[in-house]
Amino acid sequence: MTATFGWLRKQLAGIVALVLVLGLFLVARLPSVSAAEQDKLAEQFRFTPMTIALPAATKSQSIRTVNKEYEHIAAWISSVGAAIAINDISGSGKPNDLCLVDPRSDQVVITPAPDSGPRYAPFALDPAPALPTWDYMAPMGCVPGDYNEDGRTDILAYYWGRTPVLFLQKADATKFDASAFQPTELVPGSHRGADGKYNGPLWNTDSVTIGDFDGDGHVDIFVGNYFPDSRVLDPNADGGITLNQSMSHAENSGAKYVYRWTGATAGANPSAKFVDASQGIPETARLGWTLASSATDVDGDSLPELYIANDFGHDHFLYNKSTPGHIEFGEVTGVRGIDDPKSKVLGHDSFKGMGVDFGDLNHDGLYDLFVSNITTSWGIEESNFQFMNRAKDNADLTRQFKDGVAPFHDDSAEKGTAWSGWGWDVKIQDFNNSGENQIAQATGFVKGQVNRWPNLQEIATAHDGLLSNPFWWPNARAGDDIGGDQTLHFFVKSPDGRYVDLAPKLGLAVPVPTRGIAVGDTDGDGLPEFAVARQWEQPIFYHNDSPNPGKFLQLKLFTDAPVAPGPLPAAGPPAIGAEVTVTGPDGRKYLGRVDGSSGEAGRRSFDVQIGLGPKVSGPLNVHLQWRDRTGQLRTQDLKLAPGQYSYQLGTQAKEAK
């Protein structure tokens, strides 16, 4: 007994330490959602996968040709390019068309949503022969918009190895196919060399978003480039390229541009003119390996703020200080609390910035935002950001912005959204009209057979001085795997406020790397569908068959600009940036906006879709805010019952018939 007591006395410090560790673990451990509760939540959703029709293609590839210095990391260089958007491109009156980029064929494709029937044959948009091209360029994404303001939906396609191209719809077109679109340079100049091939700037663009940045009533364009101008995809080139100079603060990237709208014409030869207004971006935000962006009015003045999500370094939150004809942004950053890791403070992060979307996640009438990062356990484990807006109201938010402060705090760990995988695009949307937004997120990197995570970990912890030279990077060739079995995530809020990923229970957890998520109510039943772009795999469409959905408000908001007459129907000129605030009987607020293309490689439709829950009945207090075609700020309050409405926004909001 004495010996036992003596042994216990000797081990007392260790025993106390062990008890403390276990006690603190039990106290600090985050609560989990039970399997029964997950089943109950999953019963509220149902999605039916459908195949997306694609046109014939002359090319079929599973990896890209690359610069000779990139040959041993060709799979890494080939990891982007799948993109997708949902919108009304054909003028059907519903957002039942898809624009997608398929890296297997390097095509920009227009195709009907699968649940809308074979209304036309899928087709590809090609700049040639109207505009010059060359062999080693590839499309990376497409952004629908009415760029020449004629009421017909156009497409902006962006590329690696070329400047972006506007495909403007011709008013006199008689058939909805590739011939109905006029390829037009965004960046002025012919860019055609003596040999007839493209010889303009070698941009490598991974992100585009649109919004009326200067408040003049016309939509402008932000372009975020990834690599510096270089021959990334040219297998005949040997050198003249670089990689990121750091894993946490790389700035040796491609440039950032803002193009301000200055004029347009409609008709058989449509045109749109934009001028470079990039000087409005602060110097501190002009560099960074940009993968995603969002133009969203966060402080309620109808001037969209700009969030730039950068790989390998700081993201940038730009407060809009523009006036008509003059674009100007100021950078705002978060304030670090005593228990906040520096890398989780907005604007000071050192994570990977892979996707971004805004949405009100707590019904306080203020926009929160979600940012995707790389969060793979036993790989690279950073954290997604669920930045919650801590301002009192828009007036308080504006005051803090003017002081250079972004009052957002990352709550991802306590909310259950911090860790998911190699994150990409993200969309905040209420898919079952429950009155609570869900968060859909794409994940996964390179699919193969040889696990390269250990090699990637080595370079991730290497000295920054080695990183910019591709020679020091580990192999990532065809057949190598880095997070290739990761799946789509579908975060749903549980009754206790934490989120749980229901993708496995909903049949969405397919082990294929995903990139872009597009959202829109393609069949007009008030439930939003979504489509997913997959890297080196067939894209997929999910029809929304959720049982017992709640009530909703769906608004189609157009400007009062005239629609150019022609044989084919037109979608109408979208009121990009128009904002909707619904106040429920209990005082809770619901936000929506005509989104100019938030995200990484996926775009939602222009319809404003707000889920209200099952118990709401009308009429509801609905506040509209927009800028008319002269740039004048307008507001109007309406009383609307749940349902679907169309409004034309001019000096007043007039219901469209």
Image: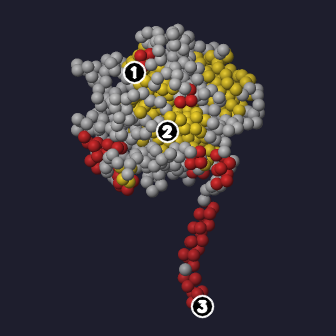
Q: Residue at x 23, y 19 (%)?
A: 194
Q: Looking at the picture, which amino acid does disc 3 mark?
A: Thr
Image coordinates of residue 96 in percent, x first then y, are 55, 26
Amino acid found under the numbered disc labelled 1: Leu
User: Is 590 above or below relative to 656?
Assistant: below
Q: Is residue 655 left or right of residue 604?
A: right
Tag 1's secondary structure?
loop
Q: Quadrant of the N terminus?
A: bottom right
The amino acid beneath tag 2 is: Asp
Q: Position of residue 577 (x, y in %)?
A: 57, 25
The 10 Å Cα crowd at callout 1, few under 14, some 14 to 19, many 20 or more, is: many
The residue singled out by tag 3 in the image is 2
Left or right of 414 in this view: 288: left
Measured along the vertical axis of the image, is residue 65 above or below residue 2?
A: above
Q: Is residue 103 above or below residue 343?
A: above
Residue matched to label 1 = 186
Which of the two discs, 3 and 2, sits closer to the camera?
2
Alpha carbons under labels 2 and 1: distance apart = 25 Å
The quadrant in which the C terminus is found is top right
